[in-house]
Image: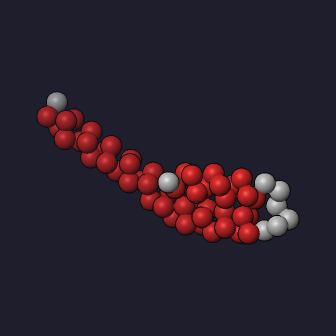
């Protein structure tokens, strides 16, 4: 049981890191995609996307 108490936190930490790293890596690309969509006049609803993005940051 002592081994389990030591392994579970490590597994949880590794799982969190594995989820956060792709989020950060994909997040940068997603931000660039958002900027491309927001500054593109041909995309309908670009202003609401920008407003939601700003509100999400705040």
Residue nearest the viewer, comparing 21 with 50: 50
Task: Name the image quarter holding residue 53.
Answer: bottom right
**What is the x, y in percent for residue 32?**
63, 69
Name the residue: 63% across, 51% down. 52
* Circle count: 0
At horizontal 72% and vertical 64% (from top left) the residue drawn is 38
- Report the residue that reaches farthest toward the top: 1
Name the residue at 58% across, 57% down.
54
The reply, left or right, for residue 38 in relation to residue 54 is right
Residue at position x 74%, y 69% from top? 39
Between 12 and 46, the one lying in front of the other is 46
- Image check: 43 left or right of 48? right
| Quadrant assignment for the N terminus | top left
Can you say whether 6 is above or below 44 in the image? above
**In this rendering, would 31 be left or right of 24?**
right
Residue toward you, 56 or 2: 56
């Amino acid at each position: 049981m002592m081994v389990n108490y030591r392994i579970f936190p490590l597994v949880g930490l590794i799982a969190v890191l594995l989820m956060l790293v792709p989020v950060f890596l994909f997040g940068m690309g997603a931000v660039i995609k958002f900027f491309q969509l927001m500054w593109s006049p041909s995309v309908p609803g670009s202003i609401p996307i920008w407003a939601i993005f700003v509100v999400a940051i705040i």
